[in-house]
Image (spheres, rainbow, N blue to C red):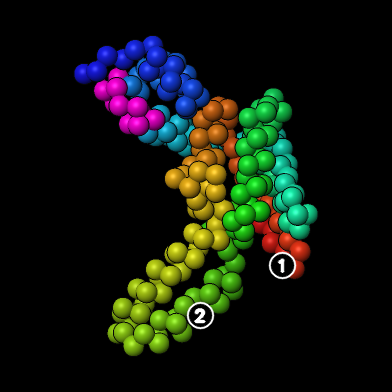
Amino acid sequence: MAEITATMVKELRERTNAGMGDCRKALVESEGDMKKAMEWLQVKGLAAAAKRAGRSASQGFVGSYIHHDGKTAVIVECNCETDFVARTDGFREFAKHLAMHIAAAKPEVVNSSEVKEEMLASQRSIFEQQAAESGKPANIVAKMVDGKVAKWLKEISLLDQPFVMDPDKTIEQFRAETSGKVGENIIIKRFYRISIGEKTEEA
């Protein structure tokens, strides 16, 4: 196994913001492979965030962003457990980046469970008409429609979207990682997006 040096631990800490002990353990578990060590820390952080998910988050911060052309604006409510965390630069930066993502990616809901039944039925009907024109058997058409619906739900749901600043992770992963860094449950409560000439979007 490769020797785990202080330099390697320091580099991993700088790249992940994880604790020194966790960085050393990650490198040991990954036999000195920096990429695998980063993945190990990510999994650990996501698991820890999952344990915090049930805790109350009644404090928070409203992040905002106005595009440089003045034609698109976003506000987003992000909740955490304590006022102390709500006032930290890291948490407020999370909210700011989230607002910038919403401005660019145009989600319609925070998560897919919030999609209204009539909206879902309308979109499914459109996909059914499109799939029917393929001339394929009914069972194949049904699978095509289900696939299109699932893809559409991911495209419009904030938590499922790839983070515009780091497309290798979803917004849910970004939220969970931030939760791990601050040590508190984080909830993206709602957002409001307005753009000149577009339909107002709120979730």
Which residue has dot 1 on it? 198
Q: Is residue 9 left or right of residue 91?
A: left
The answer to if 162 sits in the magenta stretch is no
Quadrant in which residue 138 is drawn: bottom left
Dot 1: within a 10 Å radius of its alpha carbon, few (fewer than 14), some, or many (20 or more) residues?
few
* Residue 143, x across and y down, in percent: 35, 73
Quadrant in which residue 156 is drawn: bottom right
* Residue 90, x across and y down, in percent: 63, 30
| Above or below, 174 relative to 19 | below
Give the magenta part as a residue range. Answer: 28-38
- Secondary-structure class at tag 1: loop
| Above or below, 153 relative to 12 | below
Residue at horizontal 35 percent and vertical 27 percent from the top? 34
Q: Is residue 171 left or right of residue 25?
A: right
Q: Quadrant of the N terminus?
A: top left
Q: Is residue 27 visible?
A: yes
The residue under label 2 is which amino acid type?
A: Ile
* Residue 6, x across and y down, in percent: 38, 11
Which residue has dot 2 on it? 126
**Distance in Å between CA atoms under marks 2 and 1:** 22 Å
The answer to if 33 sits in the magenta stretch is yes
Which numbered disc covers residue 143?
A: none
Dot 2: within a 10 Å radius of its alpha carbon, few (fewer than 14), some, or many (20 or more) residues?
few
Q: Nearer the viewer, residue 51 or 20?
A: 20
Residue at the front extreme, as displayed: 69
Quadrant in which residue 184 is drawn: top right
Please name the predominant secondary structure of the magenta segment in the image: helix
